[in-house]
C-alpha cells in the first residue's frame, strides 16, 4: 500500500475535499454564519467600554436609558450570534456526516478494486480499521473540533483587529506573546502528529490480531494454544496502550501550556496597560474592553490547542485512508471492453510468465490451449504453480509477461461484467456470508428466490442433503459459514456456481478434508456442474484427474506433461509417479 504517513494534516484535509465533494458542500455559507456569530461577540466589549467611559466615569450623571439601550444592543448581538453559531454547527455536522459516509463508501469500493496481491499484503483487521475506526475518528473531529477551529480562527482574527483599534502598542505586546506560543505549538503539533500516527498503527495491529484470534478460536483450542494466543493479544494491546498513554501525556502537556499562556498573557496586559495606558491614550473603559478582547483571543487559542489532539488523531486516520486510495488499481475494467461470445469459451495461455512482487517466477513461459467444452485437471506438487495458473485464467492475477485469452479475446480487454458472468471460480474453501443458505446461493445470480435455490440443489443431486438441514435453504450458515462443516460449505459454494450458469468453470478442488459421505456428494455435484462446460479443476486427489478428459501436469512453474490419464500413465513420467504416490497413500489410509 502507498505510504502517506508524512503528509501534513492540512494537505490531507484538502485532498479529502477532492475525494469526497460532500465534505465541502455548503462550506462557504457555513463559514459565513460562523464568522457572523463570532463577529457579533465583539459588540459586548465595545458596549462595555462606552458604558464605563461615558456613563460610569463620565462627568454627567448615569443615563439609565442609555445604559439600558446599549445593554439591549449587546444582548441582541449575543442572541443573534448564538443563532448563527447554531446554524453553522448544524450545517457542519450534516455536511461532515454525509461527506464522511461518502468517503467510507469510496474507500470500501476502492478496496474491492485492488488486486489480491495488494489485499494480501495488509492484514484484514487493518483494512477494516480504514473504513471503521479511522473514519469514525475523523467524524468526531469534524463534527466538534472542526467547528471549534473555524470559530476559533475567526474569533482570534476579529479580536486582533479590534484590539488594534484600541491600542496598537498593547496589541504588539499581545502579538509577541501569541507568536512565541504559536511557535511552541507548531513544534508540539509535529511531535503529537507522529505520536497519533503510531496510535493508528497500533489500533490496526490490535484489530488484526484480535480478529485473527477470534476467527481461529477452534484451531486455538484444538492445539491448546490459548496461552500463546493470549500472549500475542496482550502484547499487541499493551503496545496500543503504551502508544495511547504517551500520546495522552503529550496532549495533556500541551493543554496545560494553554492555561499557563492565558494567565501569563492576561497578567502582562494588565501590568503594561496600567503602567503605560495613560501615556498611550488608553482610557479605563478601553483597558477593560481590551482585557475582554484578550479573553476572546485567548479562549479560542486554548480550545484550538485542545482541538489539535483531535485534529492529529483524525489526520492520522485520514492519511491511512488516502494511502489506500493512492494504491493503484492494477486490474482495471477496460474502457470500451468487449463482450465474450455466447459459445465456444476456451482458455489460451501464450508464453505466460508470472512472479509475485520481489520473488522468483512462479510460472514461466507457459503455453497451452484449453478447448471449449473440455474437462481439464491440473495436477502437480505443492508450489508447482497450479493455483496461480487458475487465478490467471480468471483474471484474479495478471501475468508479468505473455497473453491470456478467453473465448478468443485477450482477457484484459474483456469487460468485467461479461467476464464475471461467464467465468466462475470455486476456491478450495468456499467462503460463505452470514445469512441463510439461499442468500449465499443467490450471490451467484442476485434476485433468485428460495424456490430457485432449492431447485438448484435438486439439479445437483443434493436434495437429500439440503432436506437434512434444520430449515432447508433457510438455514442460517453463521459468520463465514461457521454453522456448517467444510464439506457442507463447499456444497453451498458449488450450488452458487451452478446457479450462476457459467460457461467456464475453474475449481480448486476441496475434498481432502471432508468425510467420505460428503466427498461422494461433492464429486457428484461437480460432475453435474462441469457437464457441458469448459472446466479447469485443480486436482488434489487424482481420482479427479482419472475422470478428466485431459490432464495438465505442472512442475516448478511449467507444464511438463499434457495428455489423458491413460496416456500419461503409459508415459511413466511425473504424472505416473504422482499417481503411484497417491494410490499408495489411499491404500495405506
Image (spheres, grey):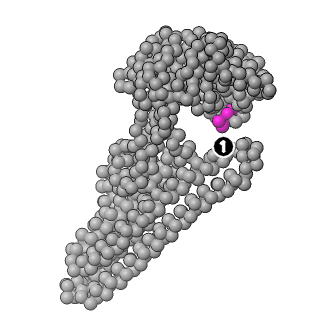
Q: Residue furthest bottom?
A: 275
- Residue of label 1: 215
Q: Residue at x 19, y 84 (%)?
A: 281
In the figure, is residue 80 to the left or right of 224? left
Q: Residue at x 62, y 11 (%)?
A: 567
* Residue 65 visible in the displayed image: no
Quarter placement of the N terminus: top left
Residue count near mark 1 (Cα–Cα under 10 Å), binned few <14, some 14–19, many ≥20: some
Q: Residue at x 41, y 78 (%)?
A: 260
Q: Please, what secondary structure does the residue beneath circle 1 have?
A: helix
Say if the magenta span includes residue 529: no
Question: Image quadrant of residue 184?
Answer: bottom left
* Residue 182 visible in the displayed image: yes
Q: Percent position (x, y) of residue 507?
A: 60, 23
Q: Residue furthest front?
A: 572
Name the one closer to the observer, 45 or 422: 422
Question: Image quadrant of residue 437?
Answer: top right
Q: Percent position (x, y) of residue 587?
A: 79, 23
Q: Residue at x 35, y 80 (%)?
A: 266
| In the image, residue 127 above or below residue 55 | above
Name the one closer to the observer, 588 or 403: 588
Q: Which residues are magenta?
A: 477-481
Name the one closer to the observer, 226 or 257: 226
- Number of residue marks: 1
Please tell me whether the stretch drawn in magenta is mainly helix, strand or loop. helix
Q: Percent position (x, y) of residue 220?
A: 72, 46
Name the one closer to the observer, 451 or 154: 451
Quarter placement of the C terminus: top right
Q: Percent position (x, y) of residue 425?
A: 56, 24
Amino acid at each position: 500500500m502507498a505510504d502517506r504517513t508524512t503528509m501534513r494534516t492540512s494537505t490531507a484535509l484538502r485532498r479529502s475535499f477532492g475525494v469526497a465533494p460532500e465534505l465541502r458542500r455548503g462550506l462557504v455559507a457555513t463559514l459565513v454564519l460562523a464568522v457572523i456569530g463570532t463577529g457579533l461577540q465583539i459588540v459586548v466589549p465595545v458596549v462595555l467600554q462606552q458604558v464605563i467611559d461615558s456613563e460610569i466615569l463620565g462627568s454627567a450623571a448615569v443615563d439609565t436609558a442609555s445604559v439600558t439601550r446599549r445593554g439591549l444592543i449587546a444582548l441582541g448581538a449575543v442572541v443573534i450570534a448564538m443563532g448563527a453559531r447554531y446554524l453553522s454547527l448544524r450545517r457542519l455536522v450534516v455536511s461532515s456526516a454525509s461527506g464522511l459516509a461518502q468517503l467510507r463508501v469510496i474507500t470500501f469500493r476502492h478496496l474491492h478494486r485492488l488486486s489480491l496481491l495488494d489485499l494480501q499484503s495488509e492484514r484484514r483487521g487493518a483494512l477494516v480499521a480504514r473504513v471503521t475506526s479511522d473514519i469514525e475518528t475523523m467524524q468526531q473531529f469534524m463534527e466538534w473540533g472542526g467547528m471549534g477551529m473555524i470559530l476559533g480562527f475567526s474569533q482570534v482574527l476579529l479580536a486582533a483587529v479590534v484590539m488594534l483599534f484600541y491600542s496598537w502598542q498593547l496589541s504588539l505586546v499581545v502579538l509577541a506573546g501569541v507568536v512565541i506560543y504559536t511557535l511552541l505549538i507548531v513544534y508540539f503539533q509535529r511531535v503529537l502528529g507522529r505520536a497519533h500516527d503510531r496510535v493508528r498503527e497500533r489500533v490496526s495491529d490490535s484489530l488484526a490480531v484480535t480478529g485473527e484470534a477470534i476467527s481461529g478460536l477452534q484451531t486455538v483450542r484444538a492445539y491448546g494454544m490459548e496461552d500463546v494466543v493470549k500472549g500475542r493479544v496482550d502484547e499487541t494491546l499493551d503496545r496500543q496502550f503504551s502508544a495511547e498513554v504517551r500520546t495522552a501525556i503529550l496532549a495533556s502537556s500541551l493543554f496545560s501550556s494553554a492555561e499557563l499562556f492565558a494567565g501569563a498573557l492576561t497578567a502582562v496586559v494588565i501590568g503594561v496597560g496600567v503602567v503605560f495606558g495613560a501615556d498611550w491614550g488608553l482610557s479605563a473603559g478601553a483597558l477593560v474592553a481590551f482585557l475582554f478582547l484578550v479573553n476572546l483571543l485567548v479562549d479560542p487559542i486554548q480550545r484550538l490547542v485542545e482541538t489539535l489532539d483531535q485534529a492529529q488523531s483524525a489526520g492520522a486516520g485520514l492519511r491511512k485512508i488516502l494511502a489506500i486510495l493512492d494504491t493503484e488499481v492494477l486490474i482495471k475494467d477496460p474502457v470500451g471492453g468487449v463482450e465474450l461470445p455466447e459459445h465456444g469459451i476456451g482458455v489460451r495461455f501464450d508464453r505466460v510468465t508470472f512472479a509475485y512482487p520481489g520473488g522468483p517466477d512462479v510460472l514461466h513461459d507457459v503455453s497451452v490451449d484449453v478447448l471449449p467444452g473440455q474437462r481439464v485437471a491440473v495436477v502437480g506438487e505443492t508450489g508447482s504453480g497450479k493455483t496461480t495458473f487458475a487465478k490467471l485464467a480468471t483474471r484474479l492475477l495478471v501475468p508479468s509477461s505473455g497473453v491470456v485469452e478467453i473465448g478468443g479475446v485477450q482477457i484484459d480487454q474483456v469487460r468485467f461484467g461479461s467476464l464475471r458472468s461467464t467465468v466462475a471460480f470455486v476456491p478450495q474453501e468456499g467462503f460463505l456470508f452470514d445469512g441463510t443458505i439461499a442468500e449465499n446461493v443467490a450471490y451467484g445470480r442476485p434476485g433468485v428466490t428460495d424456490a430457485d435455490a432449492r431447485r438448484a440443489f435438486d439439479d445437483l443431486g443434493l436434495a437429500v442433503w439440503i432436506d437434512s438441514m434444520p430449515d432447508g435453504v433457510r438455514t442460517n450458515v453463521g459468520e463465514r459459514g461457521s454453522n456448517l462443516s467444510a464439506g457442507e460449505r463447499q456444497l453451498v459454494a458449488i450450488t452458487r456456481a451452478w446457479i450462476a450458469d457459467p460457461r467456464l468453470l475453474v475449481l480448486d478442488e476441496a475434498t481432502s478434508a471432508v468425510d467420505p459421505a460428503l466427498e461422494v456428494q461433492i464429486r457428484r455435484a461437480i460432475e453435474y456442474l462441469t457437464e457441458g462446460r469448459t472446466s479447469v479443476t485443480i486436482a488434489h486427489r487424482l481420482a479427479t484427474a482419472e475422470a478428466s478428459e485431459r490432464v495438465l501436469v505442472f512442475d516448478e512453474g511449467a507444464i511438463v506433461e499434457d495428455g489423458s490419464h491413460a496416456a500419461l500413465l503409459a508415459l511413466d513420467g511425473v504424472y505416473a509417479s504422482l499417481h503411484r504416490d497417491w494410490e499408495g497413500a489411499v491404500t495405506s489410509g
